[in-house]
Structures are given as C-alpha cells and as structure tokens.
C-alpha cells in the first residue's frame, strides 16, 4: 500500500489520509460481483482445531457462533459481525458437494448466514494454519494479500 502522501485523489489533493471520503458508496453487497455478471459468494474464513471445533480466528479463541439457547436463528449483531469477516469470491472456487464449506444447519433459519460458504483452515498443534484444498486448487486467507488461490501442480 502506498503512503497517503503519495496517493492523489481526482482533485489532486494529497492531503487526504484516507480514500474513504471519496469512495464511500451505499451499495448492496449482494449486488456486487467479482466480475460483471459472474456468480459470486460470500466466504467466511473459519479455523478448525485438532478436535474438529470451528473458530473465527486462527488463535482458536472465538468459537463459530450458534443461535442462543431457545432461539432458532442468529441475532442481528452476530450476523453483522460475521458479515464483517467475509470476503467475496467467485462461486466456482468451491465444489458444490463440499459439505465442510456449507453453513451450519443451525444457521438455516437465518437467511444471510445460511447463504454463506465457509472457508475452513486447519490449525496445527503448533499454531500453523493450512489452506483449504478443493482438489484443483488451494484457498488461503492471507492477512496482507486477502484470498489467495493457488493451483495444484500435477
């Protein structure tokens, strides 16, 4: 990322430290695709420990949320928090039959959450994070690069 002093807006004003004021738009995230007309999905990266428990962070400290006892759906704040963790990706990145990428059954009554695809990353005992192997390529969420797709070498 370039330092803010080097970035210029369309007005030539280099004093703006953030591009947010000139790029903020009220756009429905569901209407945005990765390419014009391409099918895309919202991807929620998750992390699975050796005991097969699912987490929202690689340190395995924030459990994948489920509806509160007595509720059949996730509350609004939980869904909003989940959506902030998602990334957009082409639908073709995930095989349709991959059960481990489907949202939990407990989310089925929460429309936005039920439509998410999970991107499972394995976490080793040493804390190393493995990408998700789809068979044809590997997907990994990198803290600096974002969603990285690596094709399998055959």
Image (tube, rainbow, N blue to C red):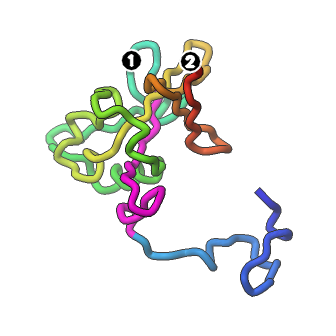
Q: Is residue 4 magenta?
A: no
In the rendered image, residue 37 lying in the magenta stretch gets the answer: yes
Residue 12, given in percent of the width and then of the height, sits at 80, 84
Local secondary structure at mark 2: loop
Numbered range of the magenta stretch: 28-47
The residue to which callout 2 is attached is: 154
Q: Residue 88: x percent and y percent? A: 46, 51
Mark 2 or mark 1: which comes first in sequence? Answer: 1
Image height of 53 relative to 112, above or below: above
Q: Residue at left 62%, top 78%?
A: 21
Few, some or many C-alpha atoms within 10 Å of disc 1 (few <14, some 14-19, many ≥20)? Answer: few
The answer to whether residue 138 is left or right of residue 16 is left
Marking on residue 52 = 1
Q: Depth check: 152 or 80 in front? A: 152
Residue drawn at (56%, 12%) of the image: 125
The quarter of the picture where residue 6 lies is bottom right
């Amino acid at each position: 990322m370039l330092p803010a002093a080097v970035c210029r807006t369309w007005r030539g004003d280099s004093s703006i430290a953030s591009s947010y004021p000139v790029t903020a738009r009220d756009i429905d995230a569901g209407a945005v695709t990765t390419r014009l007309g391409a099918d895309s999905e919202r991807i929620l990266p998750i992390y699975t420990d050796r005991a097969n428990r699912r987490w929202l962070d690689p340190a395995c400290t924030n459990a994948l949320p489920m509806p509160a006892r007595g509720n059949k759906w996730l509350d609004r704040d939980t869904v909003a928090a989940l959506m902030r963790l998602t990334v957009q990706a082409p639908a073709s990145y995930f095989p349709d039959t991959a059960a481990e990428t489907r949202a939990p059954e407990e989310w089925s009554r929460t429309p936005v959450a039920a439509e998410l695809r999970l991107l499972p990353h394995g976490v080793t005992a040493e804390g190393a994070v493995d990408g998700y192997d789809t068979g044809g390529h590997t997907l990994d969420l990198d803290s600096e690069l974002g969603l990285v797709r690596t094709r399998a070498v055959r």
